[in-house]
Amino acid sequence: MHVREIINEKLGFDDGSNLLDPDCYPPMQLEEDRFDTEIEQEQAKERAERLKTEKEDLKEQGVGAPPSEKQALATEIESIDMILQQEEAAYQEATDELALLRVVEGIRRRMNTGTKNYEKALSETSQADIKKEVREVARDLDRDAGKINSILKELKISTRITTSSKSSNGKSKYVEEMERREDEREYKTSSTDSARSGRDRSRS
């Protein structure tokens, strides 16, 4: 399911950026949706694993069996494959939804909670902070840059994440570590500059 469809159909929002606004999407509801989605994801994964085990058992039964029995087992395995595809699709959909909700939660945590205007709070949140949060979600959920960028686009955030998870593009973990360090240093520099600017204004 496309990110926009998740926002429109499952979460009931026309504007994805509203997901970042606690007044529109209360923290308690966000937490409940995330919890429910985690359960959906885990259940779909468990069902898929059971089907895979069943397939392997049937394959073992076919070892040494007569041709007619092999064909019957193969037909049964093909039926299981169809159900397995549905479960794997359900797992992917739940994972996409979970990525969206976790990005929203993470960005909210990093926003300036001292202001009630979420748009202002978001504008004051550093790009490096957002990138770091998104990379952590992508890595934990095994999601690539394209999927995460589509989430940011629907949330009306312009930051573009160019890093994919290792399993998606084979990128060295050391390259990812270097990029994370770059973001962390960029964030520290941004925070230091903001603090220095605040001190300068207080002196004047």
Image (cartoon, helix red, strand yellow):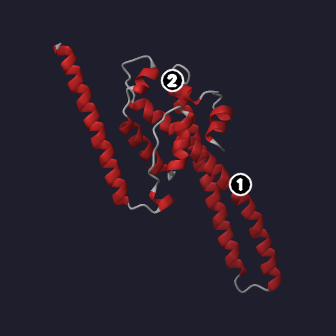
Contact between marks 2 and 1 (CB within 8 A): the answer is no
Q: Amino acid at mark 1?
A: Gln
The x, y position of residue 18, in whole percent, is: 56, 25
Residue drawn at the location 47% of the way across and 34% of the way down: 105
Tell me if mark 2 has few (under 14), some (14-19) or many (20+) residues whose alpha carbon lies within 10 angstroms of its own: some
* Picture layout, residue 84 above or below residue 95: below
Residue drawn at the location 52% of the way across and 37% of the way down: 152
Work out whether residue 202 or residue 95 is closer to the camera in this orientation and state it.
Answer: 202
The x, y position of residue 148, in whole percent, is: 52, 44
* Picture layout, residue 2 above or below residue 193: below
**Residue that carries the numbered disc 2 in the rendered image:** 21
Work out whether residue 80 or residue 64 is closer to the camera in this orientation and state it.
Answer: 80
**Residue that carries the numbered disc 1 in the rendered image:** 86
Residue 106's quadrant in the figure?
A: top left
Mark 1: secondary structure: helix
* Picture layout, residue 24 above or below residue 90: above
Residue 38's quadrant in the figure?
A: top right
The x, y position of residue 73, in whole percent, is: 77, 74
Q: In the current view of this chain or complex, which residue is farthest to the left?
A: 203
